[in-house]
Amino acid sequence: MDIKNIEEFLLTVGTDTDMNVKNEEGNTVLMWAVDIEQKDEVELLLTNSADVNLRDKDGNTAFILAANNGHKDIVKLLKKNNYIRLIVYSVVFLVIVTLIMRMIMVSSF
């Protein structure tokens, strides 16, 4: 498949495709979008569950690539997205712990 840009990739594979697939270098589509400073595509990929924490063969994440290339707007976008995910995971964790505690309390009576 000869893909020349990210929009073409997304139109070809569709947004229901795993956005975290890596190429032979270990790069994801998100890393590609970050590398060529495509902020709109980065936002679209993040909306479609692209993982900001995946690493390429050199150990770089999308965040590291953005920072190393001086893409300040993309760095902010990636940080914001990662914080939102952490908050959601924290809330889910607290809900699960609360439910377990309630189950323990009910079963002990």
Image (tube, rainbow, N blue to C red):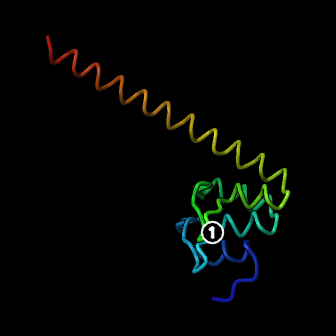
The N terminus sits in image quarter: bottom right
Label 1 sits on residue = 58
Depth check, front residue: 33 or 54:
54
Q: Quadrant of residue 104?
A: top left
Identified at 71% across, 70% down, the residue is 32
Identified at 63% across, 78% down, the residue is 12
Q: Quadrant of residue 100?
A: top left
Identified at 61% across, 77% down, the residue is 25
> From what the image shows, is residue 21 above or below residue 93?
below
Q: Is residue 1 left or right of residue 101?
A: right
Q: Position of residue 55 (x, y in %)?
A: 59, 62
> From what the image shows, is residue 73 above or below residue 105?
below
The C terminus sits in image quarter: top left
Q: Is residue 28 left or right of residue 4?
A: left
Q: Amino acid at mark 1?
A: Asp
Q: Quadrant of residue 105?
A: top left
Q: Is residue 31 left or right of residue 24?
A: right
